Structure formats: structure tokens, C-alpha cells
Image (tube, grey):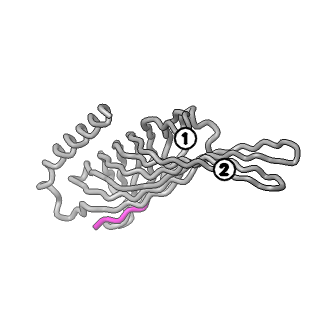
Amino acid sequence: MKRFSRWIGVIIVLCCALGLSFPAQAENQRPIYLVLKGGIYSPQTTNLNGFNAGFNGEVDFGYSFDKNWAIEAGPGYFETSAGKGAKFGSDTTQTSVHLRVVPLTVAIKGSIPVNKLEFYGIGGIGAYFLETDLGSSEDSHHGHHDSDRESETLFGGFLGLGARFNVTPKIFLGLEGKYLWTTKSTFNNAETDLTGIQATLNIGFRF
């Protein structure tokens, strides 16, 4: 928690420093924008070996302080799962684990515009609301299914790179890759985290 508090402090200081550039906003710039992101989440931690790449989606609201700096914040959703089966006689047992995550994040974005293109780096922190669903089922003459579900909140940060192409002054397309790391989950007495890669295709609208 102390480390997470320091992250918050760093973001607040950066936001205050960047806010000093607000009066210099160009008249023809549209500072407020919305970005819809869709792609994949791929776990990279050894504790999630065997887990599949799953869907990753985000909705971010942004504010450009000037042509080089912006702040983004918003919710998202990503998931991953794994399962294995075993057969004993005529019975088959299937065990599955499904992780569903709803993050709320805030980030600073620094960019370099080149004509209609924009190359940028992004870094931020967030709270990650994790739901873990552990299930087992037995395919036999009687049939049987057990499940264990738990919710908890992890904290983490991310760094990434991306590019945007301004189709019109109001619409842009882009792609983005981020590396995520989080605190650990202790569900079912097994420590794990959500360290992984998030890759998305983006569409944005300026207002």
C-alpha cells in the first residue's frame, strides 16, 4: 500500500505540473476526447502458466493539456481462463479457472505529433477488481458440479507505447501495447498476480 500511495503522489504531482500549460491551449485544438479500445490480454506471470489470452476492452476519457501531454482515465474489462480434464473409468472430471477483471485506471500520456500521426508513451496506475471462479464438474451417470468464487481488489501500474492516425480533426485510429503488473491475489491459498501484456486497436472521438 505504501508503494501504491507513492504512485498516486507521483501522478498528482505530474498532473499539477502539466496543468500549468492549460492557458496555452491552442484555439483550434479539441482537448476532450473519448477512446474505445479492444484487443487481448495475455498473462505473462509464471503463476498463470497455461492460461489463455483473453479479451481486453477499455473506455478512456482524455484531456489534452497541450499537443504533447494528456491525462486519460476510465474503466475496462479483461479476462483469462484455463482448464484441464482427467478420466477415470467412465467418468471425466474437468477443472476450470476463470479470471474476470474490471480495472479503473488513470494515466499520463506524452506524445510526439508528426503531421497526421502521433507517437506516444503512456504510464499509469489503477485498481483492479478481480473475480476468480474456480469450478469442477464430473461427467458421470449422476452428474456433479462444484464452484468456488471470490472477489478481491488488486492494485497495479502499467507502461506502454502507441500510435494514432488522425483521420479527421474529430476522429482518430490507433494501436497500443501496455505491460501490466499488479499486487498478488491469494485466492484458494495460491498466490498469483495479473502481470501481462495488453494489446488493443483503438478508435477515438474528439469533442
Residue 26 visible somewhere in the drawing? yes
* Local secondary structure at mark 2: strand
Question: Farthest residue in the front direction?
Answer: 142
Instruction: Name the residue beneath numbered marker 1.
Output: 43
* Local secondary structure at mark 1: strand
Viewer-proximal residue, 206 or 138? 138
**Residue type, label 2:** Asp
**Can you tell which quarter of the image residue 26 is in?**
bottom left
Residue 199 visible somewhere in the drawing? no
Q: Are marks 1 and 2 in contact (CB under 8 Å)?
A: no
Query: Which secondary structure class fits the magenta region best?
Result: strand
Question: Disc 1 versus disc 2: distance between alpha carbons?
Answer: 26 Å
**Residue type, label 1:** Pro
Instruction: Locate residue 193, reporting x and y percent.
Output: 49, 37
Instruction: Name the residue beneath numbered marker 2.
Output: 146
Name the residue: 43% across, 38% down: 182
Instruction: Locate residue 10, reporting x and y percent.
Output: 24, 37
On the picture, is 87 further left or further right than 207?
right
Viewer-proximal residue, 4 or 23? 4
Tell me the magenta residue range.
201-207
User: Of label 1 and label 2, which has the lower sequence position?
Assistant: 1
Task: Single out the mark in the foreground, 1 or 2.
Answer: 2
Name the residue: 50% across, 40% down: 196
**Can you tell which quarter of the image residue 35 is in?**
bottom left
